[in-house]
Image (tube, grey):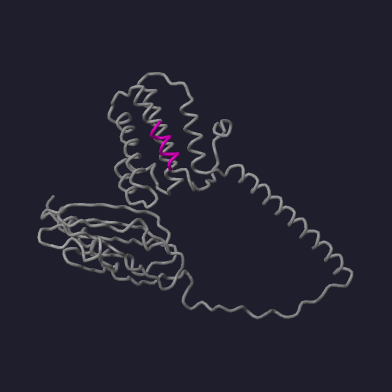
Amino acid sequence: MKICVATGIILAVSTCGALAADSIQQTNQLGPVKAITTLGPKHPMIGDEIHLEIRVQSPPDVEVLMPEFGEALDRYTILDFVPKQTIESDGTIVSIQRYTLQPYLSGDQFIPPILIEFVDHRPGHKPAPKDADAFELLTDRIDFTVKSVLPTDTKHELNPPLGELALPPSGARRYGWLIGTGCLLAVLAVAVGAVYLRSHRRKVRRRSAYEIARTRLDRLLAQPRQQTAAAIESFFVQISAIIRRYLEDRFDLHAPELTTEEFLAIARSSKDLTRVHQELLRDFLQQADLIKFAGVNATHGDIQRSAELAIQFLEDTRENAPLVEREEPEDDKRGE
């Protein structure tokens, strides 16, 4: 048994070493704050995922302001984002942001410098520079190369023609031209008809994220409800799903798969959600969780309050809600 454990440890260390060897790491420090930026793999292929980690270490009395979600990363597709914070045994606070990115193009690429701000609350230290709200720590630019799927020895040239082709007789050319023209017109007619039908169906299905969520919410609130524990729990499950789907459509926050605490952590880094909206959302989701998971008995007042919170959140964030194109279930279409 001891031999197996030792072998497992050796394998784990070897794996971590391999991952570290295939990454680029930069370290920057300003005063008591250290930032370690890691990017891997070093030489991704176009279409591969790349992983970026921003790790900031600071003393307990230093307030670190991590970068906003997606800051300076608009040149890449952001596939995943995971924020995290831990406290080490010596009291050091470690704030982490992990991104999964996908480059658009091959060739030379880079991660631009990323700004990290902090305020020093330690006794005897200046909280911030003169005429500034916080100290600014800027990470180094990380350069890397995205490989193309084409072989390096590929020649970008066309082969020469095979030679002149013999022309058919003049009569055959005339009939061939008429047949070819007729086929072309038929293909164009089919293509135009398909585009029209698809655009027509698209107009029918395209609505704003707010309109979709409000329609579903109004339909749920209009349904008669029994005052049984199962019926009340079902109500809170449905109203939570409506709001979480709206958050995904409206703010591009992938909320359905996350726990409430995980989602609220991401919501705090969203520049589109104000603090008031975050607090409103927190009250709504936490109340729903108490009913769904903690077995708390909900009163008529609790149901009414959840409905009011959901309506207020939708109305406060309805402005500039994006259009959403989605196939709706048949019962949704009949109710609209």
Instruction: Say which residue appears at 44% left-offset and 36% top-offset.
Output: 242
287 to the left or right of 330: left
Instruction: Say which residue appears at 48% left-offset and 45% top-offset.
Output: 319
**Image quarter in which the C terminus is found:** top right
- In the image, 213 versus 24, the foreground residue is 213
Instruction: Say which residue appears at 33% left-offset and 49% top-offset.
Output: 266
- In the image, 39 versus 138, the foreground residue is 138
Q: Report how many numbered discs are placed on residues in the image.
A: 0
119 to the left or right of 157: left
- In the image, 8 versus 220, the foreground residue is 220
- The residue furthest right is 171
| Residue 273 rendering spot, x and y as whole percentages | 38, 48
Residue 10 higher or lower than 162, as above or below: above
| Residue 62 rendering spot, x and y as whole percentages | 17, 57
Magenta region, mostly helix, strand or loop? helix
| Residue 15 rendering spot, x and y as whole percentages | 24, 61
Q: Which residues are magenta?
A: 308-316
- The residue furthest front is 131
Task: Using the rendered view, name the quadrant where residue 302 is placed.
Answer: top left
Residue 45 higher or lower than 320, as above or below: below
Instruction: Say which residue appears at 51% left-offset and 34% top-offset.
Output: 215
Confirm whether the magenta stretch covers residue 159.
no
- The residue furthest top is 227
| Residue 5 rendering spot, x and y as whole percentages | 15, 53
Confirm whether the magenta stretch covers residue 313.
yes
Task: Using the rendered view, name the quadrant where residue 231 is placed.
Answer: top left
